[in-house]
Amino acid sequence: MRRAAALVLIVASCTAPNTVVPPSPEPTTPPASRPPTVRPVTVRVIGPAGNVPEAKVCATRVGGEEHCATSDAEGRATVRLVAGTYSIRATPPAGRRLDDGVSNVDLSEADRAVVLLEGRATIAGTVRDVARTPLADAEVCAHATTSSLVKCARTKTDGTYVVETRPGIHKVEVSAPPGSRLLAQWARGRLGSFEADVIDTRGGDVAGLDVTLVRGVVLSGKVTAGRDGSTVKDAQVCTYPLAAPLGWDCERTDKRGEYALLREPGEYWVWTIPPGDRGSRLMYQRHDRVLEGIRATPLSLDRDRTLDVALTEGVVLRGRVTASDGEPLVLALVCVDTAFPTGRICRETAADGSYEVATRSETYVVSVQPPDGSDVIAGFYPDAQPDWTRAGEVTVGPGDARLDIVLPRGVLLTGTVRDARGAPIENATINVNDGALPRYFGSSDIHGRYSVAVRPGSYTVDVFPPRQVPVLSVVGQRIDVTTETGYEVNLPEVRPP
C-alpha cells in the first residue's frame, strides 16, 4: 500500500500546476460534393450530300459512360453531357453509302459539335489464274483518278476481294500473290494504267470486277562494267514487246548487279541503261551488245532466260541548265538522240542545274524537259527550237563535250482532259500550235491533268486521246495565253454510224 501511494505522488508532481489540457476536437462532417452540371450538346451529322438523318450519335470520354442519340431530319442529335473532352462517333443508317465519322471535341464550354461522314463505295470481284483457280493473297488497289487516294485489299482463300473506297472514278491494279510468278495487271487485262478500264462508283457499288492473271517467264542476269567486271548497281534493264506498243518496262539491278524481270511470253527488245552516277562513263546498250537501236536484235522469251550484260565506256556530254533569269533548273531531263531516233537517253539535272550524259561519239539533237508545273519552256537546243526537225546539232567525241543551256520562261496553259462522263483521260496529247505548226507539247497524267509552258501569245490548241480510248479529238480551239490560263477539255464520245 505504501508503494502505490508513492507512485501516485510522483505522477502528480510531474504535471505543472498551471498546464491546461485542451479538450479533444469534435468530429466534423465534410460538405456534400456538388453533382456535375449536365447540359444538352447538339451534334450535327453532315455527309457529302448534306445533312444525314437517322444516324446514331454516341459521345464517350475516358472513364465515362457512352451517351447516344439519333439524328433528326436535319441531321441534328442532342446528347446530354457534362463538360469535358469527348470522342463523338456518328454511324449512318444501314444502306447508306457512307462511312462512320469520328470527331474529338473539347466540350468544356462549347455546346455544339459537327461530325463529317465520308462517302463509301465498294469494288468487288474475284482474282483467278488462267486455269480458273482462285488466287488468295493477291493485292487489289483502287486508284482514284481525281485525287491521290489509293485503297487496297487482299483476296481471300476463294479469290474474292472487296475494296472499300470513296465514290468516284477509279482504275484498279491487281498484283499477284508473292512467289506466284503471275503478272500484275490493271483491270481488265491491261498492263498499264494509261489503258486501264475506268471504274465508276459514283452512282453505285461495282461488283463482278473479275481479273485473270497470266503466268509469266523470267529474264534474269547480272550487269557489270566491261572494263573491270565490277557490278553495276541501280542499272535499268528494260523490255519493249514487239507485239504491242506498250512502252518500255524496266527493273533495276540490286547491290550485286543482279536483276529479274517477270514478263509475258513473247518477243522483246532489251535495253540496259546504266545509273546516272556523276563521273561514270558507262554507256547504255541494246541487245545484242550494240549501242544503236537500229542494230538491235529481239530476244525471244518463250521460257526462262539468262542475259548477262557488260557495259562499255564512252564519252561524256556535260553542262548546266538554267532559266533565263539565271536560276538553276533542278530535276529537268536533258535528253540526247540522233536525228534518226536510235534510242533517246535522258539524265536529270542536279541541284545546281548541272548534268552529265555518257554516250558514244556521234552527232545529236539535245532536248530539255522541265519538271512538271514549271513555267520554263521545253525545247531542242542549242537553238531553242520547238521540234527536232529545226534543232541544231551537237557533236560529241572523240573527246568530251560541253553544252550549257538557257531556257526561256513563259506562262502556263493548264487544265484537265476528261471524257463525256467526266472521267479523266490519261496520256492524252496536247499540241499548242503557232499558226499551222505545233510549237509546244504536253500530255495528261493519270488524273487527266496537263501543264504546258508557252510564250505569251495567241494559239490554237489540239487535244488527241490515246489510241485505246473511244473518244474524239478536239482541235482548233483558239486561246489567248497572256498570263496563266486554264483550258478544260471534254472529249466527245464516238457515235456509232
Image: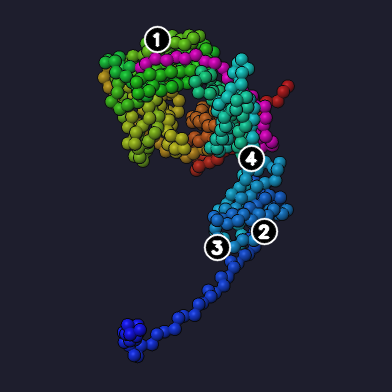
- Report the amino acid beneath label 4: Arg
Query: Are the residues tagged 4 and 3 within 8 Å (C-beta)?
Result: no
**Residue located 64% across and 56% down the image:** 67
Q: Is residue 413 magenta?
A: no
Q: Is residue 132 left or right of residue 72?
A: left
The magenta stretch is: 199-223
- Say how many tags the image has: 4
The reply to whether dot 2 and dot 3 touch (C-beta < 8 Å) is no
Return the disc, 1 or 2, that comes first in the chain's sequence.
2
In the picture shown, does residue 222 fall above or below 26? above
Q: Is residue 10 visible?
A: yes
Q: Amino acid at mark 1?
A: Asp
* Residue 48 pos. (x, y %): 64, 46
Residue 207 lies within the magenta run: yes
In the rendered structure, find residue 78 and report the number of the disc placed on it: 2
Q: How many angstroms separate mark 1 from mark 3 (CA)?
A: 75 Å
On-image quarter of the C terminus: top right
Q: Nearer the viewer, mark 1 or mark 3?
A: 3
Rendered image: mark on residue 120:
4
- Under circle 1, the secondary element is loop
13, 487: nearer the viewer: 13
Q: Residues within 10 Å of mark 2 (few under 14, many from 20)?
A: many
In this rendered view, identify the residue nearer to me: 47 or 430: 47
Q: Earlier in the sequence, mark 4 or mark 2?
A: 2
Label number found at residue 108: 3
Q: Secondary structure at mark 3?
A: loop
In which quadrant will I find the N terminus?
A: bottom left
Comparing marks 4 and 3, which lies closer to the viewer? 3
Residue 152: image location, x then y, percent: 56, 33
